[in-house]
Amino acid sequence: MSKLTVAKFGGTSVGDYPAMLRCANIIKNDTGNRVVVVSASAGVTNLLVRLSQANLSSSEQVSIINQVRDIQYNITQNLVNQAELNQEVDGILVELSEYAKLQSAEVSSKIADTILSFGEQLSSRIFAQVLKTVQVNAQYFDVRSVMQTNSSFGKAVVDTEKLKQNCHQLLVPLLTNQVVVTQGFIGKDYDNNTTTLGRGGSDYSAALLAEALNADNLAIWTDVVGIFTTDPRITDKARAINEISFGEAAEMATFGAKILHPATLIPAMRHNIPVFVGSSKEPNKGGTYIQKTVSSTPTYRSIALRREQTLVTVKSPAMLHASGFLAKVFNVLAKHQLSVDLITTSEISVAMTFDNPTGTTQALLNSTVVQELEKLCEVSVENGLSLIAVIGNKMQQKSGVGSCIFDTISGINVRMICHGASEHNLCFLVNEEQANLAVEQLHKAFFEQNVKPTELATAS
Ligand code: ADP
Ligand code: ASP
Ligand code: MG
């Protein structure tokens, strides 16, 4: 049997009929692609997030559900069995509207996850049909029968052992003569409630399935021809990287390169599964290969940017020569399930950053947590910051890396620097308004000059 590839298609790749058709042909052209993981069609999860919010009027609910229907009907109208599929879509949307009513009566994170799961449920059903139109023997598969998670709704943790057992029992037998189409992003807890793995989580689902199935490859098909030297939305000078190590790519994903969900590379690294990232729109243009060993290890590989960071500084003379102070601070944070990102210390103060994608962290840091920390020390909270990570190799072992970076952006105030913990990055905070400029300047210095980036910092 040919090698097994788990292929994941993101929201824009399954956003309309021409996009789905392109993806279907990618699958058809390589018999290795036997497990297909899809995201919701572009725009649908955002609509479902709105639908899961409290106090929506019934007309708002109807309007959102109609918008979801329009996106899906727009695809099904191209299929021969349109009527049958539309009936299926309508049935699913009736179920969705029941959950929306429940949610508007009493908002809960459990129902929110169920609502969010409908996007992937719809797109996977439709995509299985599109595959059939290009004569691929495709079968719809509900990933919730294998993707076992805990009950942390919105950021459920997957039980990888159970996933593996379930896959061997239920999924592997299906792979002998057909392509299985399933959902990213969603799972099921031990009480059979639907859960989600966090926004953008389909990449991670695909990686977990690749690991559980002992796949030979993981392919992430998206809307850009691979991983770029920086987010191509920041500068049109960004260019695709041919190959990159697991370590570097994992740092990129962690530090904000939206192209991959931050956890995607963990299962791939654990199981040494090579990952390909390419564009479903231009599959012939190649892409980025992420693997354990790569032929070049430049000092500067890429720049990642993460917006909406919160910086908390705690200060207390009691910290001087004392033990246990930091433990007390971290106990407060752990109690509220706040995860510290970066940290720097001085004699009597500690500065910490928090990622704040949804605003919930900020809300916590502005109220309860600060009050509790204030019992221990002085606390200051700053918002409106962005985290820039310069990613590369052996960065902590080379002279000139710091001066190269900070000379390049000398006109921009740097709020906090973290360097040394990882050989793959140097990261720092700047004000939100200057973040794009800083990335552009660094990109110009490292990736747009004739001089090779490796020559910008001298190997020691
Ligand atoms: P999908 O829906 O396929 O998962 P995403 O929107 O989640 O796609 O991720 C792809 C997007 O990631 C690209 O369109 C690009 O704007 C953004 N991106 C951020 N950083 C990078 C990077 N370093 N290289 C490529 N794309 C990046
Ligand atoms: N549909 C989900 C989202 O938009 C998951 C994903 O696309 O990866 O976040
Ligand atoms: Mg994504």
Image: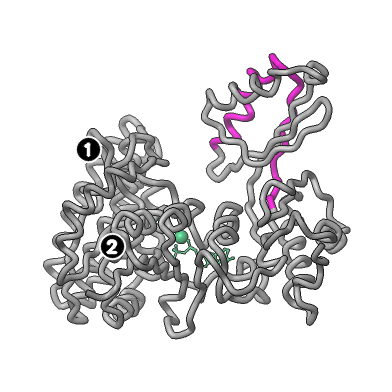
The x and y percentages for residue 110 are 32, 35
Residue drawn at the location 67% of the way across and 41% of the way down: 342
Amino acid on which the number 1 mark rests in the picture? Asn
The residue wearing badge 2 is 123
* Percent of width and height locating residue 356: 59, 42
| Percent of width and height locating residue 394 | 70, 59
The residues colored magenta run 360-387
Identify which residue, 113 or 137, lies in the foreground.
137
Does the magenta-highlighted stretch encompass residue 369? yes
The quarter of the picture where residue 55 lies is top left
Rendered image: mark on residue 291: none
Residue at the spot 62% in from the left edge and 41% down from the top edge = 341
Q: CA distance from mark 2 to mark 1?
A: 22 Å
Q: Is label 1 in a helix, a strand or a loop?
A: loop
Disc 1 Cβ-to-ligand 2 distance below 8 Å: no
Say which quadrant the N terminus sits in: bottom left
> What crowding class fits label 1: few (fewer than 14 Cα within 10 Å), some (14-19), or many (20 or more)?
few
Crowd band around label 2 with a 10 angstrom C-alpha radius: few (<14), some (14–19), many (20+): many
Q: Is residue 58 visible in the rendered structure shown here?
A: no
- Residue 206 location, quadrant: bottom left
**In this figure, which residue is indicated by the disc labeled 1?**
192
The earlier-in-sequence mark between 2 and 1 is 2
Residue 49 to residue 139: above or below:
above
Instruction: Judge whether residue 460 can be spotted in this image.
Output: yes
Q: Looking at the picture, which amino acid does disc 2 mark? A: Ser
At 29% from the left and 58% from the top, the residue drawn is 213
Q: Residue furthest front?
A: 460
Q: Residue furthest bottom?
A: 284
